[in-house]
Amino acid sequence: MPIREALEMSLVRNQDLVEVAPSAKPPVCRFMDYGKFKFEQNKRDKEARKKQKIISVKEVKMRPNIEDHDFQTKAKNARKFLLGGDKVKLTIMFKGRQITHPELGERLCIKLAEHLADISTVEKSPKVEGRNMTSIFVPKADIEKKEDA
């Protein structure tokens, strides 16, 4: 159908003539209310954004020579963050000559991993970066969702 006829038909129908596939031979057009179409599209995009879950990374800091009660407190905070759906970044800060004994930090990371094993898994194993050792824990529900997808 020639473009002039299509434009006349769109005026008669009181709708817009919208080019759907401009690269096709001949170009494909469609009659529609373009304002309504854009409104519906924005509405769908807004709903999709609403359903997104923003995962933040919460940080728990420790030193290698932490006392048991302090460790329990930090582990309790990490558990609370994981149950809230956030990732937890464990940072073990070494001071002075403590950096010569990274195995102490690794032991602490393993201890926390065992403590949180029921609700989380280790996403990033302990790694020394400068004077800090970091490890990242993720909630188990997130891992199960990724495996399903």
Image (cartoon, helix red, strand yellow):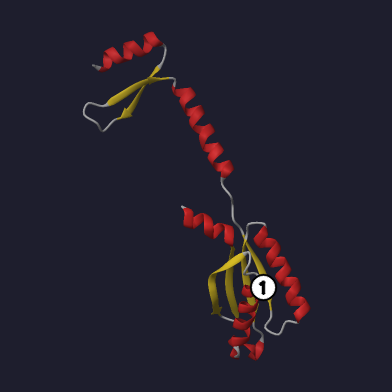
From the top left corner, tell me how far across and down residue 68 is, in percent.
75, 80
Residue 13, picture quadrant? top left
User: Residue 107: x percent and y percent?
Assistant: 62, 83
Q: Nearer the viewer, residue 83 or 30?
A: 83
Q: Secondary structure at mark 1?
A: helix
Question: Which image quarter: residue 17?
Answer: top left
Q: Is 49 situated above or below 134?
A: above
Question: Residue at coordinates 27% horizontally, 14% vertically from top-left?
Answer: 4
Q: State the residue in front, 57 or 23.
A: 57
For residue 18, above or below residue 58: above
Q: Residues within 10 Å of mark 1 (few under 14, many from 20)?
A: some
Judge left or right: residue 11 versus residue 52. left
> Label 1, on which residue?
115
Inspect the image, locate mark 1, and give the three-letter code of the amino acid beneath it.
His
Assign the N terminus to one quadrant of the image: top left
Q: Nearer the viewer, residue 1 or 119?
A: 119
